[in-house]
Image (cartoon, grey):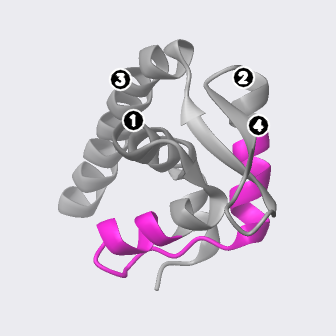
């Protein structure tokens, strides 16, 4: 399992990408999707996820809505905003550049 800080720089990208395909989702569903999509390699703690969701919401890239479930409990669901859809390719390109640079260092060092 990767160290928590190894996922830190990519968490925003993972959230944006998953929400671009599966929204609206609860926070727990996002955690589960990251685990499933990564073949159970990546795991995100709630203590990292919720600050990231709040940060992305403050940036205007996602929005959260309260819904009432069938059992009467209220929950927040998250979805991408138009600004988030615009930001996703920027984040994907950033990740591609960083991962290519890391790969280059690994090959030549």
Would you identify the image quadrant in which residue 53 lies? top right
Marks 3,4: beta carbons within 8 A: no
Instruction: Give the spatial CA distance, label 3 vs label 4.
Output: 18 Å
Q: Residue at x 71, y 36 (%)?
A: 64
Residue 21 versus residue 84 in the image, above or below: below
Q: Residue at x 44, y 65 (%)?
A: 34
Residue 92 image position (x, y, % from top left): 35, 33
Marks 2,3: beta carbons within 8 A: no
Number of the front mark, 1 or 2:
1
Write down the region rendered in magenta. 32-54
Q: Quick check: 63 left or right of 50?
A: left
Instruction: Give the spatial CA distance, label 3 vs label 1.
Output: 11 Å
Residue 26 versus residue 96 in the image, above or below: below
Local SS, label 2:
helix
Q: Is residue 48 magenta?
A: yes
Circle on res. 20: 1
Would you identify the image quadrant in which residue 5 lies? bottom right
Q: What secondary structure do most residues of the magenta stretch adopt?
A: helix
- The residue pinned by badge 2 equals 59
Instruction: Give the spatial CA distance, label 4 vs label 1.
Output: 17 Å
Instruction: Give the spatial CA distance, label 2 vs label 3.
Output: 16 Å
First-in-chain label (3 vs 4):
4
- The residue pinned by badge 3 equals 89
């Amino acid at each position: 399992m990767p160290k928590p800080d190894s996922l830190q720089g990519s968490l925003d990208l993972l959230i944006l990408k998953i929400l671009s395909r599966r929204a609206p989702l609860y926070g727990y569903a996002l955690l589960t999707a990251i685990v499933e999509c990564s073949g159970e390699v990546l795991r995100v703690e709630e203590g990292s996820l919720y600050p990231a969701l709040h940060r992305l919401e403050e940036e205007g890239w996602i929005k959260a809505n309260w819904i009432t479930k069938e059992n009467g409990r209220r929950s927040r669901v998250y979805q991408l905003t138009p600004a988030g859809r615009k930001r996703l390719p920027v984040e994907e390109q950033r990740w591609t550049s960083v991962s290519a640079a890391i790969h280059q260092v690994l090959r030549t060092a």
